[in-house]
Structures are given as C-alpha cells and as structure tokens.
Image (cartoon, rainbow, N blue to C red):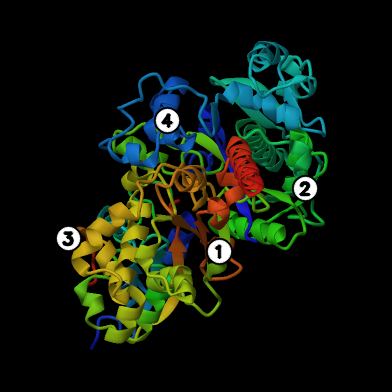
Amino acid sequence: MNSVILGSSYIMVFAPDMVIHNGTTQTTERTVNPNSEYLKEIKNHLRTFEQVVGYLPNQTYIGNITPDELSKYEMPWFDKPKDGATREGKFGEIMPQEEFIVLMQICDVFDLVKLEKQFVFDTKAKLMVHPLFDEGLLGRIKEGEEFDTIKKYVDEEHAEPIYNNGELVGCVKRAHDIDLNLSGHVMFENLVSKASNVLALLNLVSKNNINKEEIEYVVECSEEACGDMNQRGGGNFAKACAEVAGFVNATGSDTRGFCAAPTHALIEAAALVKAGVYKKVVVSAGGSTAKLGMNGKDHIKKGFPILEDCIGGFAVLIGENDGVNPEINLDLVGRHTVGTGSSPQAVITSLVSSLDKAGMKITDIDKYSVEMQNPEVTKPAGAGDVPLANYKMIGALAVKRGDIDRKELADFTVKHGMTGWAPTQGHIPSGVPYLGFCREDILSGKIKNAMIVGKGSLFLGRMTNLFDGVSFIIEANKGGQKKTSAISEEQIKNLIANALKDFASNLLSEQE
Amino acid sequence: MSLLENKKIIIIGDRDGIPGQAIEECVKTAGGEVVFSSTECFV
Amino acid sequence: MDLENQKRVKEFAEKYGAENVVVILGAAEGEAAGLAAETVTNGDPTFAGPLTGVQLGLSVFHICEPEIKDIVDESVYDEQVGMMEMVLDVDDIISEMTAIREEFSKYL
C-alpha cells in the first residue's frame, strides 16, 4: 500500500534586522564596500510586518489564497496588499521577528542565546497569547540579561549580535573558543534553522489535529549543517527539533541535497512508511538567514522593497494508507543520475520521463509543482520567472514527445502549471510549497494527480559539477471509493434493517 | 578561423538559464580551450 | 557576477592576455546577460567584486547568440541548449549583449 500525505504546514518569519545583519549579500557588501550607498539605503526599503502579512504570495504560502487566486492578480504584487490579511493561515502563520527571537532562545538548550531583560518581558507577553505556545514552551523562556552583559559578549567574546528595530536585544554566544563550527555566527544560523523548523512542526500538529506521540521519525531537509570541528555536518537537526516540538516517540535524521533535499526526503519518508518501518514520518525544514536580501541590490535599483525579508519553513506528515488521503506513488519516481548530463533538457527529461513506466503522457499529470519561487523576487534580479521556465521546458518536452501540439504550449503552462509564490529560501520553494493545496485539490476532486519536482545545484558545494533532481507523483487515493468509508453507519443500519425486514416477510410468506 | 579557435574560454553559466557544463559541451566542438567553467545561482 | 568568478576572470585575463580570452555566458535573461557582459568589459557595475573599475574589454557572448551557435556542432547545440531557446527571450539577450559589446568590448 502506498503511503499518504496526512497534512502539512507552512510558516514564515519576518526578519528585517536579519536581512541587514545576516544576509550574505549584505555581509559581503559590508566587507568589500563598507561605505556603499546600498548599505545606507537598505533600511529605507524594508517592509513593515503588516505589509509582509498582506503580501499576496505570503498569504498564498500560509494557505489563505490559492495559487489560482494569486495568478489572477496582476504584478506587481507588493503594492496590492490583501485586505484584512491575518498572520494566521490555514496551513501556518507569519511570525514577527521579536517573537521569533524569543523562540530561538526557547529552542536553545546550551544557554547560548542571551536576550535583554526588558525585551524578553515585553515579547513573552505576546507569546503568552499565541495559541501554539503552551506552558512547556513558555516555561523555557529565561528572564534575560542586562544590556551591558550582552554588549560585552558581542564586543569581547565574538558573540553574534541579535537586533530588533535596529537595537541590540540579544546575542548568540559562541559554543567553543576556537572551533569555527561552533562560532557565534554558525550557532546563530543553526538556531534560526532549528527554531523556524520547530515553528513549522508546532503548526503541523495544531493545524492537522495530529497526536504528536504517534510520530515515529523526522527527516529534516534544510541546507544547514550542525556539528563540531571533528564532524562538521554530524547532525542532527531532526531529532533536536522533534525534542522541542514534543515528539517524544520520534527519532530522526537529516537529508541533504541543496534545493532537491525536500523531494528526496519525501521519497525516503514515503518509502519508510510503505516498507512498514515507521507508521508516521514527518519531513520538515527550517529556513536560512544567509539568503535574506540575496537580490536586495536589484530590488532597490528597480524600485521594489526588499522582498526577501522572510525566513521560511514547512512540515509534512506522511502516514500509512488510510483509504482517503492522496497517495505517494513510489513506482513512478524520476531521478537525475550521474550519467544524465547537465543540459536543461536532459535534466527535465530525466525527471519527467518516469511517466513512461506507466505509459502516461505529460498531459496525464494535472499539475506540476516545480521550483515555485515567487517571480516578483526573481525577475528583477535577472533570474527570470523560474516556475514558468520549468513549465515551458516540460511543455517543450511534451511537444517533442508528441503529447501536445506546439500551438498548445502556452495553454500547457497555464493548465498544468502555477504562478510561483514561495520565498527564495533555497530548499523551501522546491516542489513542496504545493503539497498543502495539492492534498486539498485531490481530496476535493479538483485534480486527480500532481508531480512534485525538486532540483538542486550541487555544484555550489564544490564537490561535483553535477546538477541533481528527483520527482514523484501524488495521486488520488485508490481506496477512496471503498465501501467502508463511503457508506455511513446509518446507511448500514438501514441496510441491515431492510434485510431483516425482507427475511421476516419471507419467513411469514413461507408460513402462509 | 572560428571565433573561439585558439582562445581561452571562460564560461559563466546560469542555473536557471544554460548551466556551465552544457555550454562547455558546445564550446568544445568549436575549437576553444575551456579554462574555467562555473554556474551561478540566484535562487 | 559572483565575486569568486570575477576574481577568476581577472586572473585568467592577466595570465593569458585579455585579447586571448573569450567569455561565454548562459544567463536566463537579457538584462542579467548584459550585466555580466558589462562586468567583464567595463568593470563590475555593482561595485562589489574584484572587477570593480577594471576595464578588461573582453570578448563576450551569450551561448544563444548566432556568433557562437553557428560555430558549434549543430547536434551538440540541439542536445545541450536547443530546448532552452524556447524558454529564453533570445532576441532580448542578443540586443543586450550587442549593445554592451559595441560600447565596451576591446576585442571583437
């Protein structure tokens, strides 16, 4: 029996001070060009929390606007905030920076995150009314430190400063005096990844009525590495996050593969469940501060606000086939192999041609979820509309295979594609942003299946020049028509009653 | 003589355009010597 | 352009002589191609990398431009790039690249 998708969650964290202080575009600029106009200008181009919450692609990411609805709005989107938008979403939430900073401290078990007393006091009050923060989590919040103590850690002990509204409100201390893998900077990035992952896990549990004690395994698939100088990528974010989220019966491990990792992880999770190793497996990832403001220079130049101002995160629960939820079909897995080559057409062919095994046409898949980056972020930066480019490639392949006529190409990208909405957080936009809507669309019968495609730029790690990618298909549950679930208890009672009535009347007629 | 013959070729590919390796395969057929090939990523 | 790539371009131009080096780009859009081309001819327009203020004037093309496409083996081009021509705005790339070359390239 194929595994099924039981639920998912999507979260964002608005982190404007982290754009300035932790995004690599900005930190690089500070190193090579400390007096640049860009660094002076950047704070004038950051959005407010309200603007970020109202931003249409963000509302799509947390589940309040469907991709179809988003595509009906003409770009630019940044000047068309959604009326009455809320930070709570059907699939998750958008958290403001100050709450997230305290969440980082909640997630820190080595006493590395030091926050200023008043900041903690003010922010704790906000978290106390947050529905997902129970006494267990709130009880982990420490009282905080004097400002001077924090300043000393930053000035004298290489702690990574944490800012809010331009003010120093805390720091992440280094976890070792000489080990660079445990430096304040690395610990900061890892704690951001951990905390945003935990936020996704908390939302997953609450939005999908999941019993967290039933979760047996977590596969974490971000792009960070945790470890020390003797094992730099030792791990393991998965278990560390499961611990804070209260998954007491779970263990887990980390899967890496740049932006392709979430798709790899989902295939692994689905296989573990299908093989009967575990009954419920979560795939999840937090986001990165390094990528904040990555294309900020281009955004400012084009008169856009800095649009890469949010950390992303997601979580998906894979479980045993319940006869209802959409199935992950592991018979049709596509993969880019060592021998595939790196031409774009070879890459996409290797990922989509898994359909051949089932004798399916490209048009037999209702929706393709590819790299779902928000085009408003990538277009001003010269990277084009990434999902659209993917759809054109798949469409071109369909023409080549004779699945569609060349004239139908433009229609294909609309019918089988979607407008991108995900933040450019590497692994976050890759295939997975659609899983929440996909589950709904399949359950409602709007679509019958979808292909999830993840691609990764392995060459950025300088270990290989190769590209990578994997794909799989999600389809309506074949057991969905099963009588047990289609017939209600009342109907069964009626059937039995009728049968008994017939039986009795037969007996009576025999007696007569 | 072709534009690339006896030249030292530097390739700056793009993950969302044409990747470095794909350009490399092409350029090799035109007589150039590829001295550097890289692929940039904006996402 | 990535700072490391700028550094390498600069090193190769110094090592082999700017007149002997040709840069081939694979950018996804005309404007991005133009910026990369400007970087290796007139210097980094973003003032961030080692090519800031360095006017190498290198010969530079996009792989989809006819100057390159026509001298590459047709079947290899088809296999490696062909389908991407349907995705990219090749005309826009050509016009951006031509403008930059005419203005800044010293070796044509």
- 3D distance between C-alphas at marks 3 and 4: 32 Å
Dot 2 or dot 4: first in sequence order is: 4
Check whether the beta carbons of the residues at disc 3 and disc 4 lie within 8 A of each other.
no
- Label 1: few (<14), some (14–19) or many (≥20) C-alpha neighbours in 10 Å: some
Residue A216 image label: 2
Residue at figure coordinates x 67%, y 11% from the top left: A125
The chain under label 3 reads C
Q: Amino acid at mark 4?
A: Ile
The chain under label 1 reads A
- When asked about the image quadrant of residue C11, the answer is bottom left
- Label 4: few (<14), some (14–19) or many (≥20) C-alpha neighbours in 10 Å: some
Which residue matches tag 3? C95
Residue at figure coordinates x 39%, y 18% from the top left: A84
Q: Amino acid at mark 1?
A: Leu
Check whether the beta carbons of the residues at disc 2 and disc 1 lie within 8 A of each other.
no
Residue A52: % across, % down: 44, 27
Residue C85: % across, % down: 26, 68
Q: Is residue C86 left or right of residue A480?
A: left
Q: Nearer the viewer, residue A19 or C14?
A: A19
Q: Amino acid at mark 3?
A: Ser
Q: Is residue A64 left or right of residue A200?
A: left
Which residue matches tag 4? A42
Which residue matches tag 1? A458
- Let me know if marks 2 and 1 both belong to one chain: yes
Image quadrant containing the C terminus of chain A = top right
- When asked about the image quadrant of residue A43, the answer is top left
- Let me know if marks 3 and 2 both belong to one chain: no
Q: Is residue A6 left or right of residue C25?
A: right
- 3D distance between C-alphas at marks 2 and 4: 45 Å
The chain under label 2 reads A
The chain under label 4 reads A
